[in-house]
Amino acid sequence: MSDQAKTRVVGRSSRLILGLVMLGFAAYLTRQATAVFYLQALALALGLLVFFILAQWIIIQFSIRLPNWAGILLTHVPPGLLLFAGFPGGLILGEGEGLLAFLLYVGISLVIAAWQAMPGCEVTALPALIFRRHARFPCVLFTPIDTLEQKKQTKVSS
């Protein structure tokens, strides 16, 4: 990844802060949980990881270029469904296993994305480490920040 493609200070720090907040909230949620709850949440988080590994592998292997809206759907819908279905009192897993899985996966991904200065959507940070190649997807929250920082850096360089 070129230096030009790396995130800048605001993008990195916002990813790091949000990731640490999510991991802190995950730790708070688990203070009185059972072993079965932990295992279910871990299995859901690993399932999300496997999904994104497969998606990124297919996109890299076949050089698929997704439109921005498709990339946003691919990266936002699976974690959103997991969060919705597994929220405390949710439709499928009513004890909050999905919420914990969401917080763990996205929180860890945000910290890794900040550490690696990866632009785009954070849910691809773990697969990018595995493949040593980054399939960059847009992110509703961080892509505008990265774009503004990139434009500011370009103006300063000129």
Image (tube, rainbow, N blue to C red):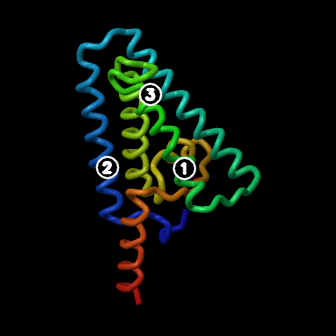
Q: How far apart are marks 3 and 2 (CA)?
A: 26 Å
**Element carrying mark 1:** helix
In the rendered image, the quadrant that contains the C terminus is bottom left
Which residue lies at the image location 26% right of the left edge and 41% below the top edge? 21
Badge 3 is on which residue?
Answer: 85
Badge 2 is on which residue?
Answer: 16
Q: Is residue 152 above or below residue 128?
A: below
Badge 1 is on which residue?
Answer: 73
**Element carrying mark 2:** helix
Q: Among all residues in the image, which is located at the extreme top?
A: 35
**Element carrying mark 3:** helix
> Measured from the top left, where is residue 111 in percent x and y?
37, 45
> Measured from the top left, where is residue 23 in percent x and y?
30, 35
Of tags 3 and 2, the one toward the viewer is: 3
- Between discs 3 and 2, the one toward the N terminus: 2
Q: How far apart are marks 1 and 3 (CA)?
A: 17 Å
The quarter of the displayed image where residue 97 is located:
top left
- Between discs 1 and 2, the one toward the N terminus: 2
- Between discs 1 and 3, the one toward the N terminus: 1
Left or right relative to 80: residue 64: right
Q: Among all residues in the image, which is located at the extreme bottom?
A: 158
In the rendered image, the quadrant that contains the N terminus is bottom right
Residue type for callout 2: Leu
The quarter of the displayed image where residue 38 is located:
top left
> Measured from the top left, where is residue 121 in percent x and y?
47, 53
